[in-house]
Image (cartoon, rainbow, N blue to C red):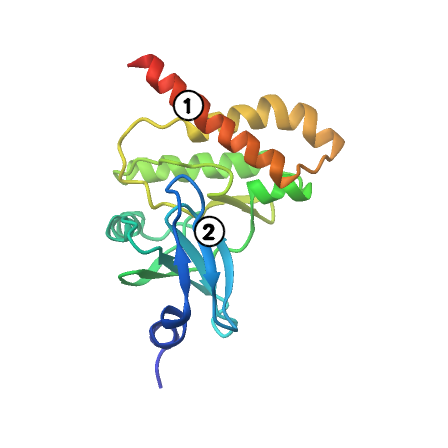
């Protein structure tokens, strides 16, 4: 009998990949899942890859990179350096174009804002501590934003480490924290407001444009 990881690997090779249509249209936007075989479900999509779950393997997820998008080897190396840490996943298996990872339960901060779920300060502190740990392991936390971090039972976790070998300066998490303490805590949290996805997307696009303009201005 196959162990659970090898059984999942077999399912990915035989069931998921041959029937999956995954496309990255723009490297700055989440990938698009055009076709997904039953009973698989999509838990989320990043700019280069999407994450899938099979109901028979609730403790693991499969991250599949879109055709033509790089980064899988770098992500494997990041997980090797991180080792075991409660705020990060673990990589159990890798084979282009997919990884099998430990599933981290929770709701990302982007969806928390949309659903009006309270984000306690401990979540922010946990993520700060996790990123400090990553730096101690020789990594460079990069592209850490609301879609890439989650909360579960009042604690924070980091779900996307694919850019942690990128040593270029990045202010994304610092800006998220500033918005949390200056805008969310005093204004949105007391009112329990739910933010429509269209508004969140406007903020995301506006922030990206702002950072590009600032970068150009500093050259």
Q: Residues within 10 Å of mark 1 (few under 14, many from 20)?
A: some
Residue 27, position as x, y percentages in the image: 37, 42
Identify the residue shown where x is 48% and y is 25%. Answer: 175
Residue 120 in sight? no
Indicate which disc residue 211 carries: 1
Identify the residue shown where x is 27% and y is 52%. Answer: 80
Residue, far bottom: 1
Tag count in the figure?
2
Q: Which residue is mark 2?
A: 45
Residue 37 in sight? yes
Residue, far right: 191
Choose between 155 and 105: the one closer to the eye. 105
**Quick check: 185 left or right of 47?**
right
Residue 14, position as x, y percentages in the image: 36, 77
- Vertical placement of residue 169 versus 97, above or below: above
Identify the residue shown where x is 39% and y is 23%. Answer: 212
- Vertical placement of residue 187 versus 200, above or below: above
Q: Quadrant of the C terminus?
A: top left
**Quick check: 81 left or right of 105?**
left
SS at badge 1: helix
Q: Residues within 10 Å of mark 2 (few under 14, many from 20)?
A: many
């Amino acid at each position: 009998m196959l162990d659970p990881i090898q059984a999942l690997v077999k399912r990915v090779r035989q069931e998921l990949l041959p029937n999956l249509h995954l496309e990255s249209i723009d490297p700055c936007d989440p990938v698009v899942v055009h076709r997904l075989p039953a009973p698989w479900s999509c838990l989320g999509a990043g700019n280069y890859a999407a994450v899938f779950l099979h109901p028979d393997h609730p403790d693991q997820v499969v991250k599949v990179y879109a055709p033509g998008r790089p980064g899988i080897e770098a992500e494997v190396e990041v997980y090797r350096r991180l080792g075991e840490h409660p705020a990060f996943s673990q990589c159990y298996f890798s084979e282009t174009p997919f990884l099998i990872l430990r599933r981290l339960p929770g709701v990302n901060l982007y969806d928390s804002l949309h659903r009006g779920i309270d984000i306690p300060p401990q979540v922010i502190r946990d993520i700060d501590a996790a990123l400090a740990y990553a730096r101690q392991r020789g990594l460079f936390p990069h592209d850490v934003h609301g879609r890439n971090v989650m909360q579960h039972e009042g604690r924070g976790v980091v779900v996307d480490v694919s850019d942690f070998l990128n040593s270029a300066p990045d202010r994304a998490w610092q800006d998220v924290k500033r918005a949390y303490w200056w805008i969310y805590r005093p204004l949105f949290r007391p009112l329990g407001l739910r933010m429509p996805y269209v508004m969140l997307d406007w903020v995301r696009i506006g922030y990206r444009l702002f950072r590009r303009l600032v970068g150009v201005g500093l050259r």
